[in-house]
Image (cartoon, rainbow, N blue to C red):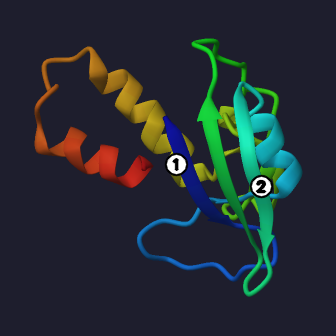
Amino acid sequence: MDIYITTRSYGFPYHAYPYDFWRYEIEDMKKIFSDFEIIKLIKDHEAPGVFLKAKKISNTLIDLSNIAIYSMILDRRTTLIPKLSDMPLQRRLTLELLGRLKNSRLKNSSLIRILRLLSS
């Protein structure tokens, strides 16, 4: 099965809707899709971005935890799975509160639904 992806690179302006977290470069896409056969990987010359066409060639999964890409939230390159200490304070506190409430009797409460929205 082929996949087609288009994404923005560093230099593309921030947009609030629907969400805007990351910027990907050609080298980032090569690392992220290293377990795929990359059929085509080119820069978008009209707006900073990347186009990818790839095919999954095996059922292997790669570890993405050490791949650093540009974060619009942190305004720097960071790993795809950020450390809690790298997150903005509001998100850290929200995730901490969610973690504490997860095992409580309030599992289906409106508060938990609101906190999940805040942390996404």
In what element is the residue under mark 2?
strand
Q: Residue furthest right?
A: 27
Residue visible at 61% across and 35% down? 55
Q: Closer to the camera, 2 or 50?
A: 2
Sort mark 1 into few (<14), some (14-19) or many (20+) by Cα contacts within 10 Å: some
**Residue 41 in picture, x, y percent from top left:** 77, 55
**Residue 94 in picture, x, y percent from top left:** 44, 43
Sort mark 2 into few (<14), some (14-19) or many (20+) by Cα contacts within 10 Å: some
Q: Does 109 appear above or below 56? A: below
Using the numbered discs, state the Cα–Cα distance from disc 2 to disc 1 in whole angstroms.
34 Å
Visible residue check, residue 78: no
Visible residue check, residue 61: yes
**Residue 80 in picture, x, y percent from top left:** 69, 39
Q: Does 84 appear above or below 54? A: above
Q: With 102 as the anchor, is 19 left or right in this view?
A: right
Q: Pointer 2: what residue?
A: 41
Q: Closer to the camera, 8 or 36?
A: 36
Residue visible at 57% across and 13% down? 59
Q: Pointer 1: what residue?
A: 91
- Mark 2 or mark 1, which has the lower sequence index? 2
Q: Look at label 1 and name its amino acid.
A: Arg
Residue visible at 31% across and 46% down? 115
